[in-house]
Every structure is written in structure tokens, then in C-alpha cells.
């Protein structure tokens, strides 16, 4: 059990904010681990709390300012980028859970997203005089983010691609993808946890705590590393990696 908790938590921590799909990676590994399915369902949701906590740790000024002045205009892009996927996700949640959460769909999502990432990465970065994402750009990013409802596409990947399509630099799009992840993940985690009727033992609560802590640490390290990466290199390597993992998954299922 300890090995399974550590492995899955580190996978979530490393992959959640990279454009490579945490869902796809967890699906590749989890069937081969000796975990109770009912516990894993809760565990898979709960460890995302670690990811939620990681972003304000690295960008505290953004969230402190948003909490102090929640109705200021600088928060509107975050709302505009989050609203489309909330609405579309609510309307299609039953279809997504009943139809799209299967191995084949997820691995094809990895492949298609990888191809898209390679194509978008070939575009030259536009000149930028500000780190801020405009309201128009955030609406475009929000519409792109709806593609993340296709399991395996990766929320991080589609928001970065959406930002680049909207005229953001890779650095702008990456930073914004981290920020808008927080309200979305909070909503998803709270909805799934409240909808779960699974009762946990004291030991299982301990495993959850360990998983959240490891995910948090993995996310903090990964976010810092990824920010340094996009400042020096392009994203094509992630696209190639996604295609390779997707093809591997299709061969294994």
C-alpha cells in the first residue's frame, strides 16, 4: 500500500501541471497496483488538493491580491477563462463519465493533444510588453480549456495551446494555465468529494494525508522546473512524449 500511495502521488505531482495529462499516466499505472477500487476513487480525487495548494505557494501575491479585492478588473480574465469549462462540464458530465472515461479515448487524447502541441509550438512567439493576459485572450483560452473535458487531452496542454492561439507567449500562457487551474480544481475536487459516499478508516485517512503531501511537493518542484523550461526551450519534446505514451497505451490495452 505504501509503495502504491507514494508512486501515484508522485505521478500526480509531476504530471498535473505539465502538458502531458495526469489522467493518462495514472491510468497506465493504477491497474497494476494492489489498491482497493473504492479507496482509489477517493484517493485519486483527494490528492489533487496537493496540486491546489502548490500554486498559491509559488504565486502568493496573485491569490492574496485576488482575495483582498475579489471584484477588481484584474480578476475578470480568470473568471472568463474558467466559466466556459464549468458550464460545458456541468451540461456534459454524465456523458463524459459514462462514455469518455475509457482507456482508448484517453490514449487517443494523449496522441491528438501531442500533435496539437507540436503544431502550436512551431508558431513564433509574438512580441509582448506585459505579463498580463487580456480579457479577450482569456475568453479564447477558456473556450480551448473545454477540450480538457476529453480525458487525456490535459488541461495544462490545452490552456497553453489556447493561450498561444490567442496571441500569448509561451511564458504568458504557461503562467496563466497555473493560475486558472486553482478555481477549476477546487470546484472539481469539492464536487467529487461531496458526491462520494465512501467512508474511510483512520489508516486510509493517513494514506490520503501522505498522498496530498507528496502531490503538493511534487507539484511545487514541477511548476518551478517547468517555468524555467519554457523560458529556455520549446514544448515540442512534450508533444513527442505524449504521442509515445499514447501509442504505448493503445498497444497495451
Image (tube, rainbow, N blue to C red):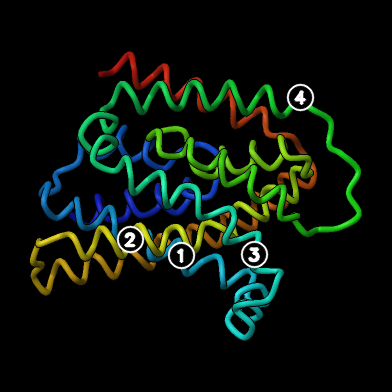
Mark 1 and mark 4: span between their CA atoms? 31 Å
236 versus 251 height, above or below: below
Question: At which x and y percent is residue 74?
Answer: 71, 69
Tags 4 and 2 in contact by the CB under 8 Å rule?
Answer: no
| Label 2 SS | helix
Quadrant (top left, top right, bottom left, bottom right) of the C terminus: top left
**Residue at which label 3 appears:** 76
| Label 4 SS | loop
Tags 2 and 3 in contact by the CB under 8 Å rule?
Answer: no
**Residue at which label 2 appears:** 189
Residue at 64 percent of width and 52 percent of height:
225
Along the line of sight, the residue nearer the viewer: 118 or 32: 118
Q: Quadrant of residue 42?
A: bottom left
**Residue at which label 1 appears:** 52
52 versus 95 height, above or below: below
**Residue at which label 4 appears:** 122
Amino acid at each position: 500500500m505504501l509503495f502504491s500511495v507514494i508512486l501515484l502521488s508522485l505521478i500526480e505531482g509531476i504530471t498535473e501541471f505539465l502538458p502531458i495529462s495526469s489522467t493518462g499516466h495514472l491510468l497506465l499505472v493504477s491497474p497494476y497496483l494492489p489498491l482497493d477500487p473504492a479507496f482509489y476513487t477517493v484517493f485519486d480525487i483527494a490528492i489533487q488538493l496537493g496540486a491546489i495548494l502548490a500554486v498559491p505557494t509559488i504565486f502568493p501575491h496573485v491569490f492574496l491580491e485576488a482575495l483582498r479585492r475579489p471584484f477588481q478588473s484584474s480578476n475578470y480574465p480568470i473568471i472568463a477563462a474558467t466559466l466556459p469549462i464549468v458550464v460545458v462540464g456541468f451540461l456534459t458530465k454524465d456523458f463524459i463519465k459514462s462514455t469518455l472515461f475509457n482507456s482508448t479515448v484517453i490514449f487517443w487524447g494523449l496522441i491528438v493533444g501531442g500533435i496539437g502541441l507540436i503544431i502550436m509550438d512551431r508558431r513564433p512567439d509574438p512580441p509582448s510588453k506585459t505579463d498580463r493576459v487580456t480579457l479577450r485572450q482569456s475568453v479564447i483560452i477558456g473556450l480551448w480549456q473545454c477540450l480538457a473535458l476529453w480525458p487525456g487531452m490535459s488541461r495544462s496542454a490545452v490552456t497553453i495551446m489556447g493561450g498561444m492561439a490567442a496571441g500569448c507567449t509561451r511564458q504568458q500562457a504557461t503562467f496563466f494555465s497555473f493560475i486558472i487551474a486553482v478555481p477549476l480544481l477546487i470546484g472539481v475536487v469539492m464536487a467529487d468529494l461531496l458526491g462520494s459516499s465512501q467512508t474511510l478508516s483512520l489508516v486510509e485517512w493517513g494514506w490520503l494525508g501522505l498522498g496530498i503531501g507528496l502531490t503538493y511537493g511534487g507539484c511545487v518542484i514541477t511548476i518551478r522546473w517547468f517555468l524555467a523550461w519554457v523560458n529556455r526551450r520549446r514544448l515540442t519534446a512534450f508533444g513527442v512524449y505524449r504521442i509515445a505514451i499514447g501509442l504505448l497505451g493503445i498497444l497495451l490495452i
